[in-house]
Image (cartoon, rainbow, N blue to C red):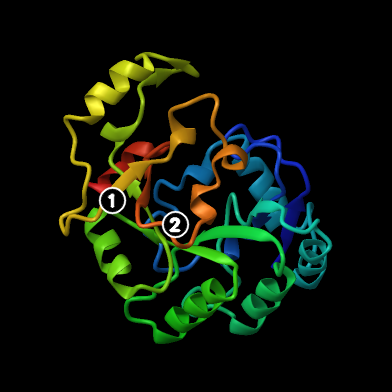
Amino acid sequence: MYFYLNPKSQNKKTGKIPVSTSDRNTCPDSCPFKNNGCYAEGYPLKGRWDEVTNGKRGGLFSDFVNQVSALPANILWRHNQAGDLPGTGIHIDVKKLRALVKANRGKKGFTFSHYDVLQNLLNRAAIKSANAKGFTINLSANNLNHADKLTDLGIGPVATVLPIEYERQSKKGVWQETINEYRERLKTLPETTPNKNKFAVCPATYRDDVTCKTCGLCQKQSRKVIVGFPAHGNSKKKASAVAA
């Protein structure tokens, strides 16, 4: 497997922070978006992901960990704009995750994982430990019901895919509704999960002046709110069907 760390991303959503991409083979079998509506399968990200998976960009995990370790202290960085934690597809590779957690010491790394933690106790313990040691792993939920179950575990913050209705309407990169129109429309949609857990739409998905760099909410382990990402990308209808 190959891993790539871009020291200053050009991704408009993340802002100019270090961002990594992991080999496609890191994606767990428990992710319903694997080959079925994943946003990372849209260009230009797909092309970069292909290069990493094919070994044309990046290097081995040991090289990647050394690069993370060399990042400046207190820096915000995102692990995996595409891909997941190192593992077999069923189990997280605990040894490699520990190495990444160690490399992140003194830094503000965060990521998202679709590895199963409801049934797989090894994965649950690994993610709980990583969060306790300062590397923020958001538990990735498929929908709001799933988000409730992950929240109940209490092992880390939760993020979820939301139905397409939560997306601010746009066409060819141009907003088709004003920010006020969008916010008014959001008021007509549920703001809590079935178990009354509060969730909020990621502001970088509907505001041009917000990025991961300026927001940092997904890195905050202590937050109570679930972060929601409206289904997006070339196959967003497929993703939205899972999130419904």
Q: How many numbered marks does the figure carry? A: 2
Residue depicted at 65% across the width and 58% down the height: 108
Along the line of sight, which residue is nearer the eye, 93 or 181? 181
Residue 48 appears in which quarter of the rendering? top right
Looking at the image, do the residues carrying marks 2 and 1 touch, with CB atoms under 8 Å apart? no
- Classify the position of the N terminus by image quarter: bottom right
Q: At 68% across and 57% down in the image, what residue appears?
A: 53
**Residue 234 can be seen, yes or no:** no
Q: Nearer the viewer, residue 196 or 232?
A: 196
User: Residue 172 in the image: x percent, y percent?
Assistant: 48, 17
Seen at 65% across and 79% down, the residue is 98
Residue 168 appears left or right of 94: left
Residue under circle 1? 242
Say what amino acid the circle numbered 2 marks. Answer: Lys
> Which residue carries the number 2 mark?
34
Density class for disc 1 (Cα within 10 Å; few <14, some 14-19, many ≥20) is some
Q: Position of residue 210 (x, y in %)?
A: 54, 31
Q: Cα distance, mark 2 to mark 1?
A: 12 Å
Secondary structure, mark 1, is: helix
Task: Please provide percent x and percent y for residue 243.
Answer: 28, 49
Label 2, residues with CA under 10 Å away: few <14, some 14-19, many ≥20: some
Give SS at disc 2: loop
146 lies left or right of 22: left
Residue 139 vertical placement versus 90 (above, below): above
Picture quarter containing residue 215? top right
* Residue closest to the eye, 36 or 187: 187
Q: Percent x, y for residue 134?
A: 59, 69
Is 163 left, or right, of 50 in this rendering? Answer: left
At label 1, which amino acid type do we have?
Val
Nearer-N-terminus badge (2/1): 2
Q: Residue at x 31, y 66 (%)?
A: 151
Q: Which mark is residue 46?
A: none
